[in-house]
Amino acid sequence: MKFLEIARLFSDLENTSKRLEMTEILSNFFQNIKDGGDFSDLNKVMYLLQGQLTPNMKQFPKMGIAEKMIIDALSIHSGVSKSKIVEIKNKKGDVGLAAEFILARKKKQKSLIDFESKGQQQGSLDISEVYSEFEKIALTHGPKSSDIKLGILRGLMNDPLETKYLIRIIMSTLRVGASTQTIIDGLALGFTGSKQNRDIIERAYNLHPDLGDIARILAERGINEIKNIQIEYGTPIRNMLASRVPYTEIPVKLGIPFIAEYKLDGERLQIHKMGERIMLFSRQLLEISDQYPDVCEMIKQNIIAKNVILEGEVVAMDAFYEQMLPFQVLSKRRRKYDVENISKEIPVCVFLFDLLKFESESYIDKPLPSRRKKLEEITKEREELKLVNSVQVKDVEELVSFFNEARKKGNEGVMTKSIKADSVYQPGNRGFLWIKLKGLEGGKLLDSVDLVIIGGFYGEGKRTGVFGTYLGAVYNPEKDDFEAFSRVGAGFSDDMLKLLSSETKKLKLEKKHKKVNCDDKPDVWFSPEIVIEIIGDEITLSNKFSSLGYSMRFPVFQRLRQDKGPTDITTIDEIENLYQNQ
C-alpha cells in the first residue's frame, strides 16, 4: 500500500469532527482493502491511525529527530530559507503544515534524493518503505548520524500531503481525531458489514491490545477467529478501571456485602511470570521490567506458580519498610540509568490485589472471591511483597471506618469491589463492579481529579517564558471528547513549569482540537495528551465552562500523571457525582 493513500485517509478524517462521518470514511477505506485482498500493511495502517508506529507493548525505537533538523532538511530540499520556514510554521501552526504549504508551491521540483534504484516515483513510497526509513533514522548513531538522518529526511520529502503526515509521525504529533472506539466501529462495518460486531472486536482488543494484530486476524480469518482471542502470557491486557459515586450509594451499586481494599499511592503493575522470566507492564501497557529488577526477582522467588498473571501496586517505602512514601518518590524509579543504585536508594513493596491467569487457565471470567483465594494460595508474603489489605463490608458505617483507617495509614483512600457471582474482571471497562473512594466530606474537596491539558496561558513576572496557567478538561466517554473544566495556575514548581512548557509546546495546535469543547480562550491550544492531577476546595456550577456546567474552586496542581492516557482521566459523570456528594 502506498503511503499517499494513508495520507489522504488522514486528511479526510481531519476534515470532519463528526464521529459518524469518521466511521463511514474508515469503513469505506477498510472495505476497499477487503476487496483488494492485500492485508500485508493493514497492521501498520492501524498503528498509524492510533498515532503510533507500533502498539505500546512493542515500543518503536526513538528517532531522535528535533524540529530544527526537519527545518534544515526542508530548507535544503525546497530552497526556502530556514527563517522563512519558521515564519510559515508559526503562521500555519506546525512544521508539517509548513512543509505541505512550501512543497505544494514547489511540487514540480524533483526530490534531491534519488529513489529510482528502488523503482519508485516521487510521492509513491510504500508504507513498508516508510517504516524502513524510520528504522534507519532510529538506528543511526555516531559522529555523522546527523548528516545521515538529514539525508533520509530529505528523501522522504516528496508529495506535499504525504510529507505533512510523515513529519507529524516523526514529531509524534500525528493527530487525525479518530478514537480507538471509532476505528473499531469502522473495522466492524468495513470487514463484517455489521456494526453489531464491534463489541466482539472491542473485547478482543481489550484482551490483546494490538489493533494491528486484531485487524489482520479479522481480515484474514474472520469474526469467528476474533471471538477465540484470549488472555496470553507476555501480552498485557487492558486494565479494569473503577468508577466514582457518592460513598452512601456504594452499597447499592455493589450489593451487600462487598469488599474494601486500601487504595495505594503507587504505580499499577500487571505482572506476567513465565517460568524464570518476569515481565512488568505499566497502566499504559509499556514494559517497565528494567525499572524494577528487584520486583522481578521478588516475584520469581515468592510466587508459587510456574506461569501466572497478577496485578498489583508498587509503592515506595522507607528504609525500614514501615511507612509508604508518596508517588513523587517512586517516580524517581523511572530513570533508565543507574537502576541498581536507585533501587537501593528507593526500596519498594508490591501489594498484589488480583489474579488474571494461572498456568493454562484464564481467571478473568471468575468472580473476585475465586481470584483472591487463588492469589492468597500462591503468594508467600514478606516485607517487600504483600497482599493488599482487604476487608468485607456490610454497611456504610463499616466503609467509613475502614476509609478513615486507610487514610491514617497514608493511603489515598479505598477501592470497593463487588463479590457477587458476576464480579468478573472486565478488561478496559469502567463499570460499577469497582468503585474508588478518596474523600467523604463536603467543603474542602478531598478527592482529586485527573485532567488532560488542552490549552495554556503565557506566564508573567517570574513565569515569563513559560506557560503560567493551564486549561484542563475531563473526558466524555459517550461522545469520546473532552469538556473544559478548570484553569490551573497554583501548585507548580519552577522545574515542573519548565518541563510542562517544553512538553506542551510539542503539542501546539493552530486551533482548538476538534475533540475539545471549550468556551474559554487560552493563548495556545494543545492536543489533549498530557494528564495532570489536581485538587481543590469544591466543584462549583460554572457559566464559564458552559459545555460541562461545572468547574473547580481554587484548583491546585498535584502531579503529572505519566501513567495515564487521555481517556483514563476523570469523566463527566464522576464530576457530577463529586458535585452531588458535596
Image (cartoon, rainbow, N blue to C red):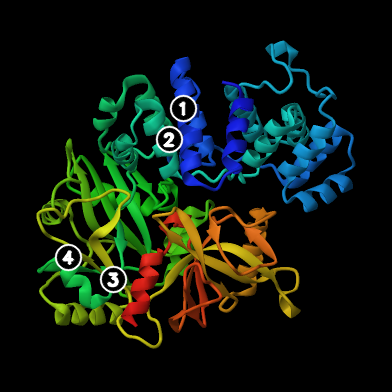
Residue 91: where, in percent of width, then height? 79, 52
- Looking at the image, residue 89 lies above or below residue 450: above
Say what amino acid the circle numbered 1 marks. Phe
Rounded to the nearest angstrom, the CA distance separating label 2 from label 4 is 35 Å
Residue 344: where, in percent of width, then height? 43, 61
Q: Residue beneath label 1, please?
A: 30
Q: Are marks 3 and 2 in contact (CB under 8 Å)?
A: no
Q: Is residue 547 left or right of residue 444?
A: right
Q: Residue beneath label 4, please?
A: 254
- Please name which of the two marks, 3 or 2, marks the residue nearer to the observer: 2
Q: Are marks 2 and 1 in contact (CB under 8 Å)?
A: yes
Using a 10 Å C-alpha cutoff, classify the residue at mark 3 as few (fewer than 14 neighbours), some (14 to 19) or many (20 or more).
many
Rounded to the nearest angstrom, the CA distance separating label 3 from label 2 is 33 Å
Precedes in sequence: disc 2 or disc 1 = 1
Q: Residue beneath label 2, please?
A: 186
Tell me how many marks there are.
4
Q: Is residue 247 left or right of residue 150?
A: left
Q: Residue beneath label 3, please?
A: 245
Give the quadrant of residue 185. Answer: top left
Q: Are marks 1 and 4 in contact (CB under 8 Å)?
A: no
Q: Looking at the image, which residue is at 56% across and 20% down?
A: 1
User: Does residue 314 appear in this view?
Assistant: yes
Using a 10 Å C-alpha cutoff, classify the residue at mark 2 as few (fewer than 14 neighbours), some (14 to 19) or many (20 or more).
many
